[in-house]
Amino acid sequence: MKNKKNIFTIILVIVFGLVFVPRIIDRLVNNDVSRSESRSLKLDNFEKNIESLPYLIINDERKKVPGFKFVNQNGELISNEFYLGKVYIVEFFFTTCTTICPIMNTNLVHIQNSFTTFPNFGIASFSINPEYDTVNILRKYAKDNGIENPNWNLMTGEADEIYELANDGFNLYTAASSDFIDGFEHSGYFALVDKEGYIRCRQDEFGNPKIYYKGSVNFKEKLDLNGEAEEITVLKEDLLKLLNE
C-alpha cells in the first residue's frame, strides 16, 4: 500500500513538471508576471511607460523660471541657479496665514516625506509678507512644520520683487490689502519646474495646458467642502516623471 502511494506521488510530480514548469519558464522569458507581482512593479512600469510631461509654451517658447535671488530661513542667499539640476515645486505663502497656507504646507511636507530618496528634489517657498517673515521667523516656521529637506528654501526679500516674481514670472495671483483675511490673498496653486528651470505641466483632454496644481486641498481628501478635488496625487506622479528624466 505504501509503495502504491509513493508511485502515485511520483506520477503527480512528473505530471506537474511536464505541464506547469514549461509554462512558468515561458512566462519568465516573456516578462509576464502575476497580478500580485505586477502590483509590486507598479513603479517600474510607470517609469517605463509614461509619456514625457509637456512644457508650458508661451508665444511659441518654453516658459522658463525668471531669475530670482532671495534670503532663506538659514540666512543664505538663494537664486534660481541653486535649483538647476533639481526638480522643484514653487509656492507663494506667508507664515501668519490662517486659511489655505497651512493646508498647502501640510501637502508639501507630505510630498517632502514621500521623496526622501531623491537628493535632486526641492521646494521653493516665497513669502508674500516679507516684512514680517524674517529669517528668524522662517527658521522657526520650518522647524515647527517639519521642513527638513535641505533643498526646501523658505525665502524672504523685497516685497516688490517677490510680487513681480509671483504675478509676472509665474502668473500666480498674489496681492496685499487690508480688505483680505490676514491682509493677503494668493491663488493656492503650486508650479512644477524641471531640472533645466522650465515650467512643466499636464494637458487636459483638449490638449490645453493645466498649468498649475491645486495645493489648497488636503492630499487626504478627494473633495473639499467646495467640491474641489485634491491634485497632490497627480503632482507626485508628474514630479516622479521629471525626476526620472
Image (cartoon, rainbow, N blue to C red):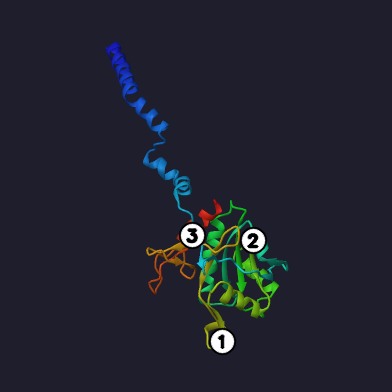
Outermost front residue: 60
Mark 2 neighbour density, 10 Å: few (under 14) some (14–19) many (20 or more): many
Give the distance between the C-alpha atoms of the residues marked 3 and 2, in whole angstroms: 20 Å
Contact between marks 2 and 1 (CB within 8 A): the answer is no
Along the line of sight, the residue nearer the viewer: 27 or 110? 27
The dot on residue 124 is none
| Mark 1 or mark 3, whichever is nearer to me | 3
Residue type at mark 3 is Pro
Residue type at mark 2 is Tyr
Give the distance between the C-alpha atoms of the residues marked 2 and 1, in whole angstroms: 31 Å
Give the distance between the C-alpha atoms of the residues marked 1 and 3, in whole angstroms: 36 Å
Residue holding disc 2: 83
Residue holding disc 3: 54
Secondary structure, mark 1, is loop
Q: Give coordinates of residue 54: x percent, y percent.
A: 48, 59
Mark 1 neighbour density, 10 Å: few (under 14) some (14–19) many (20 or more): few
In the rendered image, the vertical position of residue 130 relative to residue 139, given as above or below: below
Residue holding disc 1: 177
Residue type at mark 1 is Ser
Does label 1 or label 3 sit earlier along the sequence?
Answer: 3
Does label 3 or label 2 sit earlier along the sequence?
Answer: 3
